[in-house]
Amino acid sequence: MLQTIAWTGSAARLIDQTKLPTEVVYVDITDEKQMWDAIKRLVVRGAPAIGVAAAFGVYLGVRDFPEIDSKAFLTRVDEVCAYLATSRPTAVNLFWALDRMKAHARNMWGANPQRMPDTQVIPDIKDELLYEAKTMLAEDTAVCKAIGEHGMALIRQICGERKEYGVLTHCNAGSLCAVTYGTALAPIYYGAEQGVKFHVFADETRPLLQGARITAFELQASGIPVTVICDNMAATVMSQGKVCAVIVGTDRVAANGDVANKIGTLGVAILARHYDIPFFVAAPTSSIDPAIATGKQIPIEERDPREISHGLGRQTVADGTAIYNPAFDVTPAELVTALITEKGVLRPPYGEAIRKVLP
Ligand code: MRU
């Protein structure tokens, strides 16, 4: 399985997802500005991957900081985090990871207050920040595997005795959205390892085609049957009884269970309800934002109109035409059959279920 992010010893190595599926190119990121750009341009994308990449970005942003004193170093950590936080607004994993890095830097001194004025310890703190980013990388894989196990048990209950489990997904929430394994595709990878036969319908996911370019690419590479459909074909596929479940990922879950995910997810959820097909959302608990009461408060990224007018290698919209390009939408909790987390499957009412799994 592909690994989206790795530490080389001196750089964060990313698969450049803008080049998929025709080229598998790796880029080595060596400073925070390159990391900001990689997140902004979707070289690295998908909520969990953005979080882990940003954690390495923090380390890269402080590793050459000339040592003055501990206060200046912590100020530098805060500045790098504030800068990386401006790369993309919707995936809460970005802010979760940055907060964790800031807290780790402070805790290191908190645990050793006598060191506070001593500039000699700054290299140790730098090593600690790298260690924390590496820890997040390792944890992400474990979390995604747990999501896979819980999700597979759920899908087995739903799809039951069918010879082949047809599942529809939107955007990419597979190994390339995380370090490896992914969230929405984790149950499929886990099930396939147990011999379950899947057939995945991957929405193409306009405008940037993460479903066609990335989901289909990684499933095919793993030998899992996949069929790409244009976004406007999901209703037909559902009406023909080809899928027994829909599974998507999410960039942010509000405290009431509303979920933000790639634009088009809301339409898929409404269709699934119409055709009485369960609509599952797979997410690490780091994607839950308890500070946001409902999905209305989730900041939705708007991207360059050219992604729509010039996205397919040629101009498809006449010059001067108005274009609206929100990158995400919000699916209300009432359309979500279950949330699959590493801590188990959450059912409505989500407010209560979410409170129980958060620290
Ligand atoms: O704009 P992207 O490609 O970063 O959007 C990604 C998605 O919408 C994924 O479905 C989401 O991050 C969930 S991945 C666990």
Image (cartoon, rainbow, N blue to C red):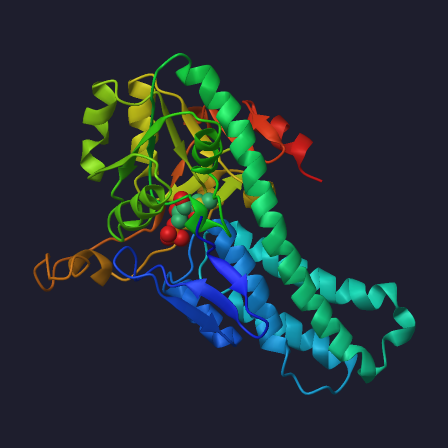
Question: Is residue 200 visible from the viewing direction of this image?
Answer: yes
Question: Is residue 256 visible from the viewing direction of this image?
Answer: no
Q: Quadrant of the C terminus?
A: top right
| Place of residue 55 in the rendered image (x, y in percent of width and height, measured from the top left) | 59, 63
Number of labelled discs? Answer: 0
| Place of residue 326 in the rendered image (x, y in percent of width and height, measured from the top left) | 31, 51
Is residue 165 positioned above or below 81 on the image? above
Q: Quadrant of residue 75?
A: bottom right
Taking the image as shown, residue 200 lies to the left or right of residue 313, namely right
| Place of residue 275 in the rendered image (x, y in percent of width and height, measured from the top left) | 29, 18
Seen from this angle, which residue lies furthest right? 114
Q: Quadrant of residue 319?
A: bottom left
Is residue 312 positioned above or below 272 on the image? below
Is residue 81 positioned above or below 224 on the image? below
Of the pair 26 and 238, the residue shown nearer to us:
26
| Place of residue 348 in the rendered image (x, y in percent of width and height, measured from the top left) | 54, 22
Of the pair 23 and 194, the residue shown nearer to us:
194
Taking the image as shown, residue 347 lies to the left or right of residue 118, namely left
Seen from this angle, which residue lies furthest top? 161
Taking the image as shown, residue 344 lies to the left or right of residue 151, namely right
Is residue 69 positioned above or below 128 on the image? below
- Residue at point 26%, 50% (across, down): 209
Of the pair 138 and 338, the residue shown nearer to us:
138
- Residue at point 42%, 25% (across, down): 196
Of the pair 166 and 173, the residue shown nearer to us:
166
- Residue at point 12%, 58% (across, down): 321
